């Protein structure tokens, strides 16, 4: 009898450890929202939207990076199990580094996944890295290749395009063990090859998924500079649908201002799962995985302009949870929004933006 009770107790404890009422990220020690507020424009202890019923519908995740996926068949099984009906895949802004080393496996992996699963591909993201490194020959070659892929129907737009992408480890040993040291990418925005990309996208009414970080580590964010730039290009290239990666990495107030000014600005929603150097880039949620109230209200104001783009990276050291646990967190976040907009954020905005039938 004692053995049976002991076994039952251990089973219940183990079951509770794997339940998803709260995300693992809440267990991180040493996080202080007051200190985080010191390097943000906004209060990281501010009001958040509490969880209610999790969203239970199918999901369209329209900004993910399965570059490191080792077992594609297993990955697709997990997508099906978690009710992902559609995905948009792209390489990361720093993916060009592998090509410089002669490794194009990740590129082939993305194409293979796109053929095996209901998905779309964004391409041309490597071009900006080659420009920044002064490899204009490769930038030209890969832009021409991306255009050929678009015209062949293999890609639907350009992305993920890193205009500014900083090292988020901030020389912190703990962060180095999770996010790692990242190469910095600061693009000359007037480069002629990049401007040709804009012209082609505008002429052909394409989407451009842009990653633009307004701050490095604990520097003061140059948010106004980023907003002014997007106001300029959204007006100059009215036929491009601009998607700002990760809610633009600016404040909700500034993104509201930008969306009011530019009807062709959209944005993907990336919940932050753990504190890192990313925290000074205005995350839409707190460390308890709850949307800040101001962000929740903005998503509800523009449900046709925001879509789920979680930035999930399979087999990446930053994500120490499974895809199932990650998806559970996403469902709780979406479920905290007004029921009238949940399908828009989870499905319809992406569906309309990428013209999915």
Image: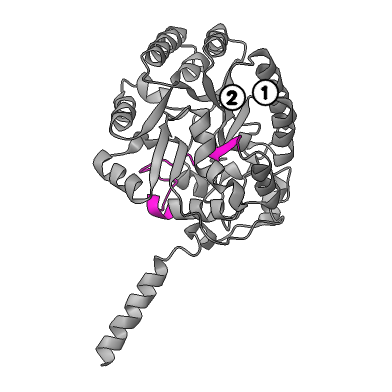
x and y percent of residue 24 in the render? 48, 59
User: Up-down: is 203 above or below 311?
Assistant: above
Q: Secondary structure at mark 1?
A: helix
Give SS at disc 2.
Answer: strand
Tell me where residue 332 appears, x and y as whole percent: 52, 56
Is 321 or 333 nearer to us in this picture? 333
Q: In the rendered image, is residue 198 in sight?
A: yes
Q: Position of residue 154 (x, y in %)?
A: 36, 20
Q: Residue at x 52, y 38 (%)?
A: 348
Query: Viewer-proximal residue, 33 or 313?
Result: 313
Vertical side of 52 occupied by 226: above or below: above
Residue matched to label 2 = 242
The residue that disc 1 covers is: 230
Q: Is residue 117 above or below residue 99?
A: below
Magenta stretch? 304-326
Question: The C terminus appears in which quarter of the rendering?
Answer: top left
Q: At 37% from the left edge and 77% from the top edge, which residue is drawn?
A: 12
The quadrant of the image that shows the N terminus is: bottom left
Residue 246 in the image: x percent, y percent? 57, 37
CB within 8 Å, label 2 to label 1? yes
Is residue 270 visible in the rendered image? The answer is: no
345 vs 137, left or right, is right
């Amino acid at each position: 009898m004692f053995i049976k009770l002991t076994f039952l107790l251990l089973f219940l404890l183990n079951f509770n450890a794997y339940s998803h009422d709260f995300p693992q990220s809440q267990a991180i020690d040493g996080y202080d929202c007051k200190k985080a507020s010191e390097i943000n424009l906004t209060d990281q202890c501010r009001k958040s939207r509490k969880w209610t019923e999790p969203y239970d519908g199918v999901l369209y995740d329209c900004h993910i990076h399965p570059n490191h996926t080792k077992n594609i068949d297993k990955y697709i099984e997990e997508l099906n199990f978690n009710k992902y009906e559609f995905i948009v895949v792209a390489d990361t802004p720093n993916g060009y580094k592998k090509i410089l080393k002669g490794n194009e496996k990740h590129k082939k992996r993305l194409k293979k996944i796109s053929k095996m699963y209901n998905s779309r591909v964004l391409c041309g993201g490597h071009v900006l890295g080659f420009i920044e490194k002064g490899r204009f020959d490769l930038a030209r070659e890969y832009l021409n290749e991306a255009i050929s892929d678009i015209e062949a129907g293999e890609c639907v737009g350009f992305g993920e395009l890193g205009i500014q992408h900083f090292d988020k480890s901030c020389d912190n040993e703990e962060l180095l063990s999770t996010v790692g040291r990242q190469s910095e990418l600061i693009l000359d925005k007037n480069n002629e090859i990049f401007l040709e990309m804009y012209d082609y996208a505008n002429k052909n009414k394409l989407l451009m998924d842009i990653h633009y970080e307004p701050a490095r580590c604990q520097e003061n964010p140059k948010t106004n500079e980023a907003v002014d730039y997007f106001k300029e290009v959204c007006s100059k290239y009215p036929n491009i649908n601009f998607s700002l990666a990760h809610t633009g990495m600016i404040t909700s107030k500034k993104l509201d201002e930008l969306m009011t000014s530019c009807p062709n600005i959209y944005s993907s929603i990336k919940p932050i799962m753990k504190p890192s150097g990313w925290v000074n880039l205005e995350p839409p949620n707190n460390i308890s995985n709850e949307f800040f109230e101001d962000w929740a209200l903005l998503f509800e104001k523009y449900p046709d302009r925001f879509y789920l783009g979680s930035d999930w990276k399979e087999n990446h050291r930053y994500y120490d949870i499974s895809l199932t646990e990650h998806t559970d967190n996403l469902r709780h976040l979406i479920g905290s929004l007004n029921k009238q907009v949940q399908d828009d954020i989870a499905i319809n905005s992406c569906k309309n933006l990428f013209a999915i039938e």
